[in-house]
């Protein structure tokens, strides 16, 4: 298992750089990234790496030891990173400007064609509270049995059933006794309330028993209700899971669950949150999520973005493999997996402070890190430094097509968000207007079912001053799914 970072790449110098060049590089990095001058979270993250790299490369004996180990470990590229800016240049303006950066990760082509052998350390955390009684719980059982059948003996598998208490009904272990696991699923009964923290805490305990960099360590939570009094505890648990390399995906069935909470829960670990609109869809959703986990080429992908001190990260949105709003207030941002034959991409929105100087300038340093599963290359890192030029006036040009496509689709997602926010303020007229505009955009895009749903919700808001739970989630998750790129960036 290899885990030595590329200190030369981190410092931005060649492997044969002399001591003076390394010291100059460190001073330049300190001027850009030191927390005293740059308050962006990503600057602090990356400056810690720079300081560690400098401590080794500036010491002749430590550098010699590092060079010897590095020669033994060099194995070529595992994935590449492409960063695209929405503007080729910035205008000299006395007001803030918005800039978008599209960050894409793609498996290196030769490795992309290789046959993967990916092993899962998978934990299902299943709600069996009273509201799951009937077809919901029965479909969950069917899905769990299909997952058990499709996993192999090298996969680690566990199931936690929860309501207002939690129990591991299948303990984490290699899946050698499939009939026994199915039998324990069959006896699940619906009763009690919904306490998600209980379920996830027990799920983490099971997943942690076999958690390893060799596995895709993941928890899938399925619930149909709201949890009470423990949301903050649950989010803190998700943050701990992310630090331990465990992803959490959350699936809500029906219309009673808290979508904002499940979004936050998933985004903290690089997982995904999804809406299951009927018991019949449970099997498809769960099996599809497990299938994609089994296609991972690299796991625990994170991106750290360190803009210059006069630039702020305003938002982050993962576009693929599954669209998901991410938490841009912390760094690094967990993105989950990079799949064989696919790509992982995220769109950052930056705010640039008023500019006063013409000429070339740096924008941001982007650092992507991940674990390569097959080769067991841990902490593989790719870094890209973005720069631009400040000119007297803005050159009128459209953003590159991938960014333009993402922004157009994001607009529809933002429309349903704005309708919700307007309604929360009590502005029924504004909410209705956003929903009608959304319906028009959806019909124009050929999304007739979603367009009709938006029109129905506009009429409902106008008459009842409220969104329906089902309609709100259908629009939120339906417009989110549209954001995925129409063609893979890996092609």
Image: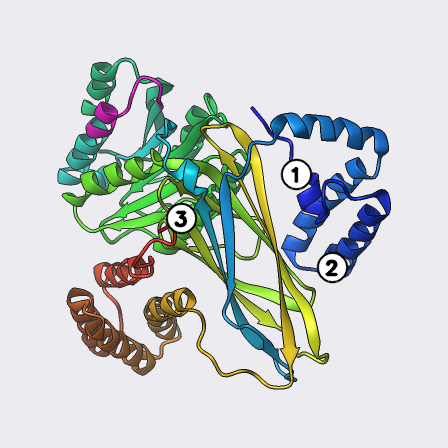
**Residue 6 numbered mark, or none:** 1
- Percent coordinates x, y for residue 254 in the rendering: 22, 50
**Front disc: 2 or 3:** 3
Which region of the structure is painted magenta?
A: 146-156
Q: Is residue 339 left or right of residue 3?
A: left
- Magenta stretch: residue 153 in it? yes
Front one among 350 and 338: 338
Q: Is residue 65 above or below residue 418?
A: above
Q: Are marks 3 and 1 in contact (CB under 8 Å)?
A: no
Marks 2 and 3 close (CB-CB < 8 Å): no
Image location of residue 75, percent across then percent down: 56, 32
Horizontal arrangement in the rendering, residue 374 relative to residue 420 (left or right): right
Residue at image mark 3: 343
Residue 19, picture quadrant: top right
Dot 1 crowding, Cα within 10 Å, few <14, some 14–19, many 20+? some
Q: Residue drawn at (37%, 26%), measured in percent from left and top? A: 117
Q: Residue at x 42, y 24 (%)?
A: 206
State the SS at label 3: loop
Crowd tier of the residue under label 2, counting other residues whose Cα lies within 10 Å: few below 14, some 14–19, many 20 or above? many
The residue tagged with tag 1: helix, strand or loop? Answer: loop
Q: Residue at x 46, y 37 (%)?
A: 299
- Residue in the picture at 50% in, 70% down: 86
Residue denoted by label 2: 32
Q: Position of residue 223 (x, y in %)?
A: 29, 42
Upstream in sequence: badge 2 or badge 3: 2
């Amino acid at each position: 298992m290899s885990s030595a970072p590329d200190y030369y790449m981190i410092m931005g110098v060649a492997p044969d750089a002399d001591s003076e060049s390394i010291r100059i590089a460190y001073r330049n990095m300190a001027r850009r990234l030191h927390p005293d001058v740059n308050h962006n979270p990503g600057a602090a993250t990356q400056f810690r790496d720079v300081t560690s790299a400098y401590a080794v490369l500036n010491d002749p004996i430590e550098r010699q030891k590092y060079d010897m180990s590095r020669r033994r470990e060099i194995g070529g590229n595992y994935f590449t990173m492409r960063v695209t800016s929405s503007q080729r240049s910035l205008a000299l303006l006395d007001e803030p400007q918005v800039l978008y950066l599209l960050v894409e990760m793609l498996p290196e082509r030769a490795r992309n064609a290789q046959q993967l052998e990916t092993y899962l350390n998978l934990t299902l955390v299943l709600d069996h509270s009273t509201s799951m009684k009937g077809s919901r719980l029965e479909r969950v059982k069917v899905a769990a049995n299909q997952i058990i059948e499709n996993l192999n003996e090298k996969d680690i598998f566990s199931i936690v059933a929860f309501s207002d208490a939690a129990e591991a009904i299948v303990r984490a272990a290699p899946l050698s006794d499939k009939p026994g696991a199915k039998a324990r699923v069959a006896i699940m009964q619906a009763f009690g309330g919904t306490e998600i923290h209980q379920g996830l805490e027990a799920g983490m305990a099971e997943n942690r028993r076999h958690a390893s960099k060799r596995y895709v360590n993941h928890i899938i939570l399925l619930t149909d209700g709201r949890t009470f009094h423990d949301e903050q505890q649950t989010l803190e648990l998700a943050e701990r899971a992310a630090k331990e390399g465990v992803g959490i995906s959350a699936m809500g069935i029906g219309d009673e669950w808290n979508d904002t909470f499940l979004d936050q829960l998933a985004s903290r670990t690089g997982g995904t949150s999804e809406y299951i609109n009927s018991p019949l869809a449970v099997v498809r959703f769960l099996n599809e999520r497990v299938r994609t986990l089994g296609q991972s080429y690299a796991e625990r992908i994170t991106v750290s973005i360190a803009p210059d001190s006069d630039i702020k990260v305003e938002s982050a949105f993962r576009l693929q493999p599954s669209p998901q709003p991410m938490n841009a207030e912390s760094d690094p941002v967990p993105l989950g997996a990079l799949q064989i034959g696919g790509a992982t991409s995220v769109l950052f929105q930056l705010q640039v402070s008023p500019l006063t100087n013409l000429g070339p300038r740096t924008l941001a340093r982007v650092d992507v890190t991940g674990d390569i599963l097959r080769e067991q290359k841990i902490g593989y890192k790719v870094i890209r430094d973005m720069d631009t030029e400040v000119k007297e006036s803005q050159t009128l040009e459209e953003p590159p097509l991938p960014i333009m496509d993402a922004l157009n689709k994001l607009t529809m997602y933002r429309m349903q968000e704005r309708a919700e926010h307007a309604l929360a303020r009590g502005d029924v007229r504004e909410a209705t207007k956003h929903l009608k505009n959304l319906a028009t955009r959806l019909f124009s895009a050929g999304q007739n079912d979603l367009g009709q749903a938006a029109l129905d919700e506009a009429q409902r808001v106008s008459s009842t001053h409220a969104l329906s739970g089902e309609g709100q989630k259908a629009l939120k998750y339906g417009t989110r799914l549209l954001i995925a790129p129409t063609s893979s960036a890996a092609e």
